[in-house]
Structures are given as C-alpha cells and as structure tokens.
Image: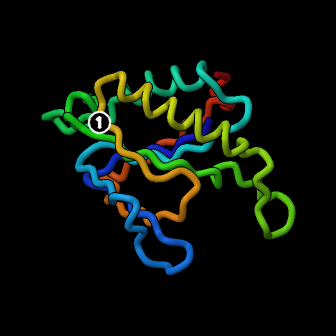
C-alpha cells in the first residue's frame, strides 16, 4: 500500500456527478478539522498484514506539536480525525512516454475492500474516519498544517 499522509487543520471532500459536472447530491460532503488527510493506493498483493501495520503506524505517529513546539503528540493526543480518500493514481508509472500506466494499481474490487479494511482498522483504534467515495470523481480541499506530508509505502518498508 502507498499512503500520502498530510497533517491538516481542516479537510473536506465532495463527489462530482460525471454527467453534469455539478456536486453529486447522493453523496454527503465530508469534513474534518485537525487530523490527517490520507490518500490511499492499494496493490493486488496488499492485505491484512499491510493494513494492520499501517493502522498502527498512523495511529501512533507523533507529528502534532506539544507545548514546546516539538512533534510529540499523536492524532489521539489532539483528538484529531481522518479523511481517507482512495487514490489509485499513487501507483502511476511514468517511466515510458507521457501517459501514466496504472498496471500496479490493485483491481478495483480488491482495492476497495482493502481501503475499507484500513478505514475500519483505524476506527477500531477509536479514531473518527470519514471517507470519500471509491472510484468517484472527487474534489478535495485541505489546509496542510506545518506543512507535514509523509509517504508510507509498505513495499519500501518491507511490510
């Protein structure tokens, strides 16, 4: 799995109706205050092992400032929330030509299942997790706080 984690002071997502280009009224826009906005990419080889490791790492990551301005607090310490967005384009291969290849991205059924598994694993850690809509055209707004942006890649980490 590949995740782009951004520490945010706020983030939101809505879904665009592909036909009209206007907001999709069947999706209630999601908003969070302080916390993390996660962009989540899944490969076909990802499963429970990767989900469990990532949920533990995300929950315990200390990137929020303490009273001395040091990154000592976790998302729990600041009562933060998560906005999770599935994003297959994190597996874009741009080595050849100018059009990205997405052959390393997980098959949609598998990717959606693993993405939900991650979100549920984070909820099991007593975190509020809001989601975009899998496979939809979304508009995401966020205010990166710090800025703090961290890349988590289970392949690179040997997970």
The residue at 59%/21% (across/down) is 48
Judging depth in this view, the residue of 19 and 10 nearest the camera is 19
What is the quadrant of residue 97 in the picture?
Answer: bottom right
Q: Residue at x 44, y 34 (%)?
A: 119
Q: Position of residue 69 (x, y in %)?
A: 20, 39
Q: Nearer the viewer, residue 148 or 42?
A: 42
Taking the view exactly as shown, the residue that stands out farthest to the front is 26
Looking at the picture, tell me which residue is in the foreground, 125 or 21: 21
Please, which colouring scheme is shown? rainbow
* Furthest residue toward bottom: 20
Residue 136 position, x and y percent, is 54, 59
Q: Is residue 48 above or below residue 31?
A: above
Instruction: Locate residue 118, reporting x and y percent.
Output: 49, 31
Q: Residues within 10 Å of mark 1 (few under 14, many from 20)?
A: some
Q: Quadrant of the N terminus?
A: top right
- Residue of label 1: 128
Residue 42, picture quadrant = top right
């Amino acid at each position: 799995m590949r995740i782009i984690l951004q520490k945010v002071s706020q983030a939101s997502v809505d879904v665009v109706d592909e036909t009209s280009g206007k907001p999709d009224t069947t999706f209630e826009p999601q908003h969070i205050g302080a916390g993390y906005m996660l962009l989540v990419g899944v490969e076909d080889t990802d499963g429970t092992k990767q989900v469990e490791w990532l949920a533990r790492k995300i929950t315990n990551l200390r990137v929020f400032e303490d009273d001395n301005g040091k990154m000592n607090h976790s998302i729990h310490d600041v009562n933060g929330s998560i906005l999770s967005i599935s994003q297959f384009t994190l597996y874009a291969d741009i080595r050849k030509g100018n059009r990205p290849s997405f052959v390393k991205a997980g098959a949609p059924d598998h990717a959606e299942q693993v993405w939900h598994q991650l979100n549920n694993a984070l909820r099991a850690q007593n975190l509020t997790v809001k989601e975009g809509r899998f496979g939809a055209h979304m508009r995401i707004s966020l205010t990166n706080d710090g800025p703090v942006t961290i890349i988590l890649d289970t392949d690179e980490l040997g997970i």
